[in-house]
Every structure is written in structure tokens, then in C-alpha cells.
Amino acid sequence: MKGTVLIVDDDRTFRFAMGKALRRFGFVVDEAESAEAALAPLSRPQGPDVVLLDLRMGGMGGLELLRRRINARSRFVVLTGHGTVQAAVEAMKLGAFSFLEKPVDAEVLAPLLLQAIADRKSAREGGVDYVPPLVGPSEDMEAVRRFVARAGPTDATVAIYGETGSGKEVVAHHIHLASQRMNGPFVPFNGAAVARELFESELFGHRRGAFTGASEDHAGLFREAHGGTLFIDELAELPLDSQAKLLRALETRMIRPVGEKRELPVDVRIIAATNRDLWAEVQAGRFREDLFFRLQVLPIVLSPLRKRPVDIVPLAEHLLLRLGTGHTIDPDAHQALTTYRWPGNVRELLNVLRRATLFAEGPVLDGELVRRMIAASVFAHVDSERGSLAPSAPSGSQAAPVRTSLAEVERSHIEHVLTEMGGNITRAATALGIDRRTLQRKLKGYGIDAE
């Protein structure tokens, strides 16, 4: 049994068809013909894991049921045939887990329900394995949800392409949760964060004494992910010799730890991701052609946030909900968010919202504050040699003053944040969306004393 689902919809045909389909997926399904009829099952101490809720029904509407939140433990997924951005935003403000527009296939819905159930379980057990839902009413996000639903149940290798911060790891985790391996480990590996000489040790493990510093046996990520999924991000960073060993592992399901004389069997699904054009890397001789084609079993390209502006506000509302600060966004801030191009994608949006909640003087994030936080984000996308904005810089927004050098904008903002944080470098780094070491380097470069 995967979990309990309550379908709240006044369309009897829809309830019957969706209930039948979800039962085939292993869910226990209950039905309510109205929001009023849903009050009783929602009032039970345990309550359903997930509520599929139609917004427009006779009598009490879906939004009113959301406002009442009879059972705070249940997760709400809003399904409606009258979907608008405004309805999505309102539902997310009221705590909906996700928002989908009818008609929706059960095979698309099932992975989302599993994630909602996992979110409830994580909150109940105090876990840290929360995976953000695939939020957004755009056609591109709908295509991603369909891909997850179809790719998840297979054991095929997946290649995810997308810009930095576009959510590649989130999509990979959703594929894992939609697979038969969902109860196994999901192990991420960032190729850009590991020294090149340590790639093989990190991935395949090593024996004690295999090299200087190998003071004990190390299992490696392949064996750590046994029975589950290994997500390899920044795939193009792998050295050619490590690529050859990865190819062999994919083809034979066998690995050889560094210093080991025999090969060891592994049962791992590989999901790889990159922000580069892998075929261009092949042509440049930096990536193996045979590995490229071996990874192309199930490829998907994630659209950058700027190409799906309809998703920005619902996504921002969801991120604010997860931050748990109680802040909301006013219409002018909506306009500021949707006119910026978000070169850092979802990761940058989260950082801007996090900073905005720290500096907000009330519960509402207004347009002026959001534009100021966006301006502080611009310096991360500066071409330092030309001293001008990179091609992905904001368009149509009031983000950055052109009469002031971007270095001055950065310095001024860092000083402002440090003052707000009482000179605490760790808190200031968090507010700026960078790590402590990066902030210390910038302070030294600008000659700023944290005191």
C-alpha cells in the first residue's frame, strides 16, 4: 500500500475513473462528492495522506476547504478544469502541495502523489529528504511531469540537460521516487565538486593502502547506491579515463574499486545531468562518443525559468511556503519577478526570496524590496573582464543602476547585509546566497572588515 488518497470532486465520472486508476497503482482511495462531505474524513486524527481537490464545486468551494485546513497533516493537490495562474497562486498561498489542470492522466499524477506522501512522512518523522514538487502550470512543466511518469517505472538510464539551477537534481529525484527503486537510496554526486584525481575513488571506492592517504577501505558511491539510484551531476567534468570505467559499469553492472583485484557486482540505476552540450564535448574530444550514446536512452531537456514565466509566481509562492516565514508577495512584486530573466533559474529565485524575507519590514514582500534583492543578485552574472552584464542579465526590470559599476553595487550590498547581520559572516553568507569561504574572499578583496 503506497498511501491513502481522498478524491474530492462533484464529478462522479471523474471520481470513479481516477479512483479506479489510482487503485491500480497501489493507492487506497476514498471519495467525497463535495467539500462538505470531505470534512468527516479530514477530521479523523490520521486523515488521508493526500487530498485531490477540485476548486469549483457546488456549495463550499475547494479554496474554502483549503482555508479551513481541517487536517494539517494531509497534503492537498489541486485539480481543476478552470486553471489560471491566479487560482494556482491562491492555492499555493493556502498551502496546496501542487496544482495541476484537468484533464490529467493517473500515470502523471501517481509520481506527484508519491512525493506528497513522502513530504508528509518527512515532516512527521522530522526527516530532511524533502524533494520540491514540480510546480508550474506551463506546458513545459507538464511535459516534465509526463516524462517523470513514463521514465520513472523503467530502469533505463536518463540524461538530463539544463542550465545551472534549473532543477536537474529535483527531476532526477522525482524519477527515482516514481521507480521501483523508490525505497532504495538516492545518492547524488557532483562532478564539479571533486578533485579530478579522486573521481574513481569517490565513484567506485578504494582499498586501504591503494594510494597515499587511503588509510581505510572506502565503499564508493556505486555501492552506496546499491538497490537505488546514483545521480551524477556535472557529468562533463568526468576525466576520460573515469568515463571509460563509467561506461563499463553501465554495460556490465560491475565495478572495480581502486586497488581491488576483482570486479564487484552493483545494482544501480544511473541518472546523469549536465549544463553543457555533450555532443559538442564529444566533437571537441573531451567526452567519449560511446558513453554519450549509452546515456541517450531517455534524454530530457529542462527549460530555463525565463522561458516559462507563467511558472514563476506559483513557484515563488511555493518556495515562500517552504521557507516557513509567513511572508506573501504583492502584485507589484509579481511583476518584478516575472520581468527578470533569472539567469540562475530556480536556485537564484530561492536566494532572492530568502534575502527578501530577511530584509522585509512586514509580512508582505513588495515590488521595491524584491527589485532591490534582484539587483543584489545581478553581480553574480557579471562578465568581470568587460565589467558589463552577461547576455543572461535582466531585461525589462529595474534591477541594476547603470550609472554605478557592478563592483560598487556588490560591495555596497555586502556591507549592507553585514550590518544587518551584526557582522556575523555565516549569517551574512546565508542571506547573500553564497558560502562562507566565498564571502570571506570578497571581504578581503574589497578590504571590508566584518567588525
Image (cartoon, rainbow, N blue to C red):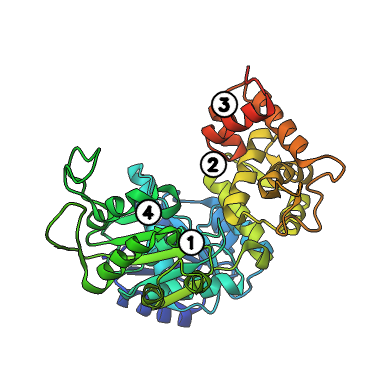
Which comes before the other along the chain, label 1 or label 3? 1
**Callout 1 environment at 10 Å: few (<14), some (14 to 19), or many (20+)?**
many
> Can residue 9 be seen in this snapshot?
no
Identify the element where label 2 is drawn: loop
Q: Residue at label 1? A: 168
User: Which comes sooner in the sequence, label 4 or label 3?
Assistant: 4
**Which residue position is annotated with label 4?**
189
Q: Nearer the viewer, mark 2 or mark 3?
A: 3
| Residue found farthest to the top | 451
Q: Nearer the viewer, mark 1 or mark 2?
A: 1
In front of the other: label 4 or label 1? 4
Residue toward you, 105 or 254: 254
Q: Earlier in the sequence, mark 1 or mark 2?
A: 1
Counting from the top left corner in percent of width and height, residue 34 is at 50, 68
Residue bearing mark 2: 324
Left or right: where does residue 253 sit relative to residue 243?
Answer: left
Mark before the other along the chain sequence, 2 or 4: 4
Q: CA distance from mark 2 to mark 4?
A: 28 Å
Residue to which mark 3 is pinned: 425
User: In the figure, 383 relative to 80: above or below?
Assistant: above
Task: Indicate the amino acid at tag 2.
Answer: Gly
